[in-house]
Amino acid sequence: MPFEHMVAFRYLRAKRKEKFISLISFISIAGVAVGVMALLVVIGVMTGFDQDLKKKILSVNAHVILIKPGYSLEDYESLVREVETVPGVVSAKPFIYTQVMVSGPGSISGGVIRGLDLPTIDKGGPPALELQAGTFQNLAREAEGELPEVALGNELAKNIGATVGSQIKIISPLGTLTPMGRMPRIKNFQVGAIFHSGMFEFDNTLVYASIPQVQNYLGLEGKVTGLEIQVKDIYAADKVAAAIKAKLGPAYDTRDWMRLNRSLFAALKLEKIAMFIILTLIVLVAAFNITSSLIMLVMEKTKDIAILKSMGATRRSIMQIFMLQGVIIGAIGTAIGLCLGFVLTAILKRYEFIKLPSDVYYISTLPVKIEVLDVALIAGATMLISFLATLYPSWQASRLDPVEAIRYG
């Protein structure tokens, strides 16, 4: 072991008269640990929130949607076949989407009706949705004399006082033109299923029905709003969308999920960066403690430094001794902080004891997701701050004149 390391480790073991310096070092370690723990937990929550939000958005929305601005799609079967030949596309399905009013036994509420294709209904509806009552397969049923069935989000069902089997009215402003003006379309439906997506906005507005029933209700025989497209790599959805548009021509427009939610995810990213910078200030405060403890140690070890220099130790060696001490303090604090952070995030993830108002935050519990890159960034930033905190006292120690130190020490 190099002698610089031996001296540095020896100075870490404080003697009786150096107890105060040791206390400051302990406070420095505690400060670094608290800062690292706070950073890890907050960044873990922000990452978990971001990923959970993406998951919930994609549980209902497609990776890419294809529409014809100002028009409905008529020959959509041939479009589906053409789109599915584009590299990166997994599948393409027709959909209908329009705003409506939903009137139930207890109240009336605004909503959005979405038409699902029959294969999706036969498979039990969108796979990411949690079915709470009824079954999606009922939506494909067309029995004579019976009302067509729909699936409601659980919050919407609660708002209008509907349960499985309840009769509801769906009112569309896209009505028929009459001599008296445009009259809204009103049709009775029966609730066949109630689902939960985990995102309040969807659960409070979504109504699912089969595409044939929605076409019949809106008078869109043989027409759909657009195509929902699933891609292999969700983060390459913008490139696939551009390829689809290039293939079909300017009459069509494509919108990927990142483009549709750009402002939301940009705000989350900015908030994550801001929280990282703010919480790094905790580590910065601890770094000042490291600096002060090293300055006091240099003052205490003036004679030792002079003796080491007189025995041939270079300025670089003296700097290494005190820099190593500061780095060790930072490393211990970082390790403790990471351990505490991992424990706290594991507790948050397992017990979910922090509840959030779902109508404000889209989700009801605090999500946590620890990524290796975030851990490396936190540890690296902390160690860099700890290292920078050692530069001034180490430089001061290296400049010490051994003759003056021995004479006046």
Image (cartoon, rainbow, N blue to C red):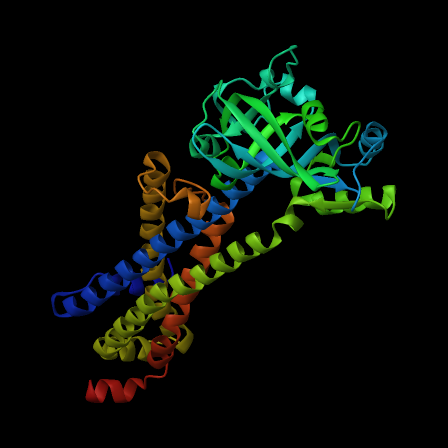
- For residue 388, which quarter of the picture? bottom left
Q: Is residue 338 left or right of residue 211?
A: left
- How many marks on residues? 0
Q: Which is nearer the eye, 240 or 229?
A: 229
Q: Residue at x 27, y 64 (%)?
A: 28
Whole-percent x and y of residue 296? 24, 76
* Residue located farthest toward the top when viewing the structure as drawn: 144
* Residue located farthest toward the left when viewing the structure as drawn: 16
Whole-percent x and y of residue 86? 82, 36
Whole-percent x and y of residue 197? 50, 33
Residue 63 in sight in this render:
no
Q: Which is nearer the eye, 43 or 204?
A: 204
Q: Is residue 184 left or right of residue 297?
A: right
Q: Which is nearer the eye, 283 or 291?
A: 283
Whole-percent x and y of residue 142? 66, 14
**Quarter that holds the N terminus:** bottom left
Q: Residue at x 46, y 44 (%)?
A: 362
Q: Which is nearer the eye, 322 or 78?
A: 78
- For residue 74, which quarter of the picture? top right
- For residue 306, which quarter of the picture? bottom left
Q: Is residue 236 left or right of residue 332?
A: right
Q: Residue at x 33, y 79 (%)?
A: 397
**Quarter that holds the C terminus:** bottom left
Q: Residue at x 51, y 43 (%)?
A: 53
Residue 404 in sight in this render:
yes
